[in-house]
Amino acid sequence: MSSAADISTAVEGLTLQSTSETSKFPNCYPTLNPVDIYREHIAEKLGEAAGIDPIKIYDRLQWTNQLEKGDLTLPVPSLGIKKKPQELAQELVEKFPESDLVEPPTFVGIHMQFFFKTKDLTKTVIERILKDKDAFGTNGNQGLRDPTDPSKGKKKIIVEFSSPNIAKPFHAGHLRSTIIGGFLANLYTVFGWDVIKMNYLGDWGKQYGLLADGYKYFGDEQKLLADPINHLFDVYVKINKIVAEQDGPIKELKEQIKAKKEKNEDCSALQTELDKLVDASEDEKARRYFKSMEDGNEDALALWRRFRDLSIKKYRETYARLNIDFDVYSGESQIKNESMTAAYQTMEKAGVSEQSDGAVIVDFTKHGAKKLGKAIIVRKDGTPLYLTRDIGAITEREEAYHFDKMIYVVAAQQDLHLAQLFKITELMGYKDLAKKCEHINFGMVRGMSTRKGTVKFLDDILHDVADKMHEVMKKNTEKYEQVQDPVKTSDILGITSVMVQDMTGKRINGYDFNLDAMTSFEGDTGPYLQYAHARLCSIVRKSGLDVNDLGSANLDLLTEKHAIDLARTLAQWPDVLLNTTRTLEPTTILTYLFRMTHSLSSSYDVLKVVGSEPEVKLARMALYESARQVLHNGMRVLGLSPVQRM
Ligand code: ARG
């Protein structure tokens, strides 16, 4: 058994640690997670004293959200021993031997409660945090295919997220997908998975024929280069207006023809007129243009490719502000016709699809999935749909990446779409593939717009929130003058505001986009979290101590309840992080961070640094620096950039 984390590596600014130490308990890594030392200890001691298999106990020990309930609890019915729970708990409590690490246990109801002996805990936890730094809480062993044999490699996960549509607004659904997806990618990274971040762009369809067409009238090279996303949207809106204008007379003619037909009157003149109108319409031109794209016409494709490339270039910059860097820019356009054709054939062979009015459909009600209704796979005119491309994509990704898991981060509005996709995958006979896929959904954001009420592109939103934060910062002139790069800082604070607001509730709950509430320092907001971090940085600065000297601190001097409770809370971080891989909810981390920062802010008056005896000062500084480290690590996994000053 080696004594410490052997491997510590950095992946995209996130650090993670692994160990070669093994334990007889599954998922037990005492050198990475201090609480595992206590789990191991309690399981062994209790097992021995009561004649229960320690492995069984180990697994059932739970961490708590409230310190007054203990550091670990054991719900005794979970042991599966045929005895009245109260009696059993009483008996186990009595049998538990004296221990160096934990206080004599107690029981409340059916729960045994274990409180760690604080002197040792404080030491172990703080020393560990100061040593592991950015890697504290991470555990690369979790991502191994075989936890006992690293040579078998890491598990691979594709996180597909953000996925906006070129030349269309980046709406709130894309914003949430970006925030949640970025967080999930970080989470799997710090647990040692091989993570592929994939953006599946909406970049194919007749609308791109229309866009190319519109560009001929309204396009401006300079604007395109300077701001492709806004300019393309502009062009798209303008050309759509023309389509709508042309649509009026066409509809009218169609109705006149219909009326004549009903009366059995001759309508050939009208029909000729209609054909002319349709033929000259932008809509028809767009259809033809897109057809030539589909047929692989290089000229047609070149323009589209330019739009796509320039948009991606711009997106990259915006994503960078959110600490996100995609590994793959895929998209609907990238799905090969062969993959879709192969899928049709498989579906047909498996008896999944059927002909209906010239189209190919899947009737889920015939395949034991009533709720999924029916879905069109191939249109009458032979063209594929959004769903069809996703079917092609899922098989292509399986081929290309051989992943262990794939997550689609998409709004709950598309629940049906993804349920249909996974069901079809299963029905085609790819059961294992379907099982590896998961839809991570989320509710709607209401009222997302900029203050000017203008177009809603991610960039505009972020600028707007940054401006607001800049105003807020300027109000404190003294502090403002000390911030090195206020514009950059206000940008980070703005982004933090948006992200924290988004990650506050459970994913499935929607929320109102509220600029004032999210940028406030009151309540559990982004600025509050950043402030907590900046304040800890300022304590370090003002102490005049070097954080590298904190190792020599005498931690026995941390005797106050505030200090001990803070250390106990910090000890929970690795468990909280691990628990997040089960909930896949950013709020799991956020709730913890707020609980920790509240505990911090009530400590400042009691545990002063400046003005204390040198020894005490050093010990308290070690505690605060540990808190700063954990806050920093939590913020980083969420995708936030902790600031030093604000
Ligand atoms: N571009 C789509 C939209 O804006 C989201 C794509 C979601 N991912 C997928 N594989 N269907 O609605």
Image (tube, rainbow, N blue to C red):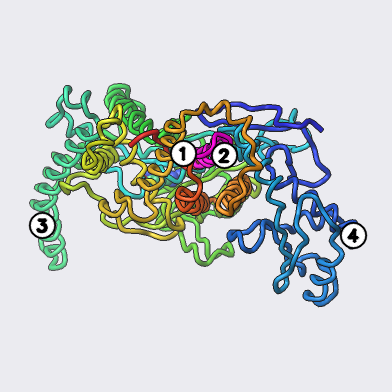
Label 1 Cα crowd, 10 Å radius (few <14 / some 14-19 / many 20+): few
Q: Amino acid at mark 2?
A: Val
Q: Is residue 466 left or right of residue 85?
A: left
- Residue 588: where, in percent of width, then height? 52, 53
Label 2 Cα crowd, 10 Å radius (few <14 / some 14-19 / many 20+): many
When asked about the image quadrant of residue 194, the answer is top right
Q: Are marks 1 and 3 in contact (CB under 8 Å)?
A: no
Q: Which residue, given by chain and number where applicable, does mark 2 sit on?
A: 616
Looking at the rendered structure, the secondary structure element under dot 2 is helix
Q: Which residue, given by chain and number where applicable, does mark 3 sit on?
A: 252
Q: Amino acid at mark 4?
A: Ala
Marks 4 and 2: which is nearer the front? 2
Bounds of the magenta segment: 610-632
Looking at the rendered structure, the secondary structure element under dot 4 is helix
Q: Which residue, given by chain and number where applicable, does mark 1 sit on?
A: 611
- Is the C-beta of the residue carrying label 3 under 8 Å from the nearest atom of ligand 1? no
- Residue 228: where, in percent of width, then height? 24, 29
Disc 1 to disc 4, how far (Cα)? Answer: 49 Å
Q: Earlier in the sequence, mark 1 or mark 3?
A: 3
Q: Earlier in the sequence, mark 1 or mark 2?
A: 1
